[in-house]
Image: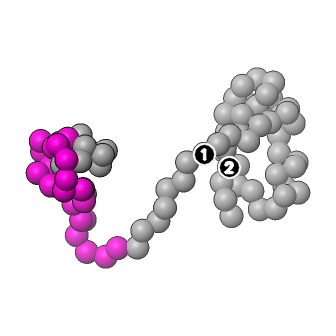
Amino acid sequence: MPIYEYTCADCGAGFEALVFTAESAASLTCPKCSSGSIVKKMSVFAPSVAHSGPALPPRCETSGPCGSPNMPGCRSGMCGLG
């Protein structure tokens, strides 16, 4: 059951909704002004990673110029840590 983000076209309020079916999505209204004029926003997602044990350090590429001085293995500058 996905959670979607919406914006009200009338009052501009943003809200989230747990959507069970297409029919339930069609009947959504703005919780602030009760308008049915809502627009589904583009959302990012957070994948769930099953991992037991200690947290692993970030892994980076090993070629190119160093982009992050605190991560000696990060040499590409593309790892997002620099």
The residue where tag 1 is placed is: 43
Q: Position of residue 61 (x, y in %)?
A: 24, 56
Residue, x 84% and y 58% (percent of image)?
Answer: 22
Q: Is residue 71 magenta?
A: yes
Please report the bounds of the magenta region as a residue range.
51-74
Q: Residue at x 11, y 51 (%)?
A: 72
Q: Position of residue 76 (x, y in %)?
A: 23, 47
> In this orientation, does residue 30 appear?
no
Quarter holding the N terminus? bottom right
* Tag 2 residue: 4
Determine the residue located farthest toward the front in the rendered image.
64
In the image: residue 2, left or right of residue 22 = left
Pick out the residue farthest to the bottom. Answer: 52
Is 19 in front, or is 75? 75
- Tell me the amino acid under the disc marked 1: Ser
SS category of the residue bearing label 1:
loop
- Mark 2: which secondary structure? strand
Q: From the viewer's perspective, is 74 left or right of 30?
A: left
- Sequence-wise first label, 2 or 1: 2
Residue 27 is a magenta residue: no
Would residue 9 be found to the left or right of residue 58 on screen?
right
- Majority secondary structure of the magenta segment? loop
Instruction: Give left or right: position of 6 versus 43.
Output: right
Position in image of residue 62 (x %, y %)? 19, 56
Query: Residue 54: horizontal and vertical position, in percent?
Result: 22, 70
